[in-house]
Amino acid sequence: MADQIKYWHVTYNDIHNLIRKVTPQIAKEFNPDLLIAIGGGGFFPARVMRTFLREQTANKTLQIQAIGLSLYEPVEGATAEQLGNEVIRTQWLGADAGKMLIGKNNLIVDEVDDTRKTLHYALSELQKDVEAELLNYPESEREALRSKTKFAIFVVHNKLKPKLAELPADTPYFAGHNVEDLWLNYPWEAIAIEEHDARAAADKSSL
């Protein structure tokens, strides 16, 4: 990508095709039972991925659940110091979160891995929900249930930059595309989609 490009406009078709390309690998290596979309950027990718995963897994039933996390966007009640520094939870899976996750292959979906702080928070908190739910089972059953409860991560774009948080080495990680550290403009953020797509075409022509 040319050095002068600092912004990149991504189209719905771009995202659709990246997900279609990586889904067979995810189906083979992880075989998700549940998709957990991080709102709002993970909603569209999760829905597209569900279609391709069902095709790859013989129409396996796949639910999509949503969690709301904010790192950069202003949230009511958040301070200026928190913005960009602290992940704020705005929506979660509910009181039965752990029960929903136990014994399943859970795929966390987001649009971009920038600093990795949001993904780290999501994974850590979901794992805490699992551990809390395991306390409701006999101690003799907990380790088997824990080993059957797995998490993986999929992002449409992974920015090739130093991360501010780490993921466990044993967590499967999938990315549709590794990109430079530039500003990604997603179509769901656009008001005039035709203008957005025109700019996306211009971005590609400048390569």
Image (cartoon, rainbow, N blue to C red):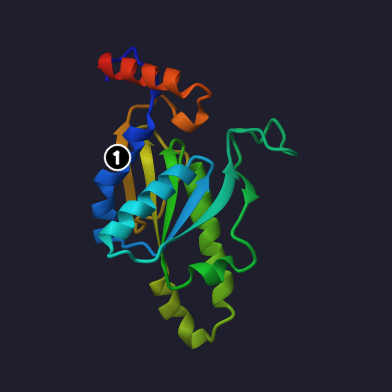
Residue 42 shows in the view: no
106 sits left or right of 94 in the view: left
Task: State the image coordinates of residue 29 (x, y, percent, origin top left).
Answer: 26, 60
The residue to which callout 1 is attached is 18
Q: Quadrant of the C terminus?
A: top left
Residue sitting at x 39%, y 52%: 153
Decide: is 164 above or below 125.
above
- SS class of the residue under badge 1? helix
Residue sitting at x 49%, y 32%: 188
Decide: is 19 above or below 54.
above
Residue count near mark 1 (Cα–Cα under 10 Å), binned few <14, some 14–19, many ≥20: some
Residue 26 shows in the view: yes
Decide: is 53 above or below 82.
below
40 sits left or right of 146 in the view: right
Nearer to me, 152 or 185? 185
Task: State the image coordinates of residue 6 (x, y, percent, origin top left).
Answer: 39, 17
Q: Quadrant of residue 70?
A: top right
Q: In the orientation shown, which residue stands out farthest toward the right?
A: 77
Task: State the image coordinates of residue 174 (x, y, percent, origin top left).
Answer: 32, 48
Q: Quadrant of residue 203?
A: top left
Residue sitting at x 24%, y 60%: 28
Number of numbered discs visible in the structure rendering: 1
Nearer to me, 33 or 153? 33
Q: Quadrant of the N terminus?
A: top left
Q: Amino acid at mark 1?
A: Leu
Q: Quadrant of residue 81?
A: top right
Nearer to me, 157 or 57? 57
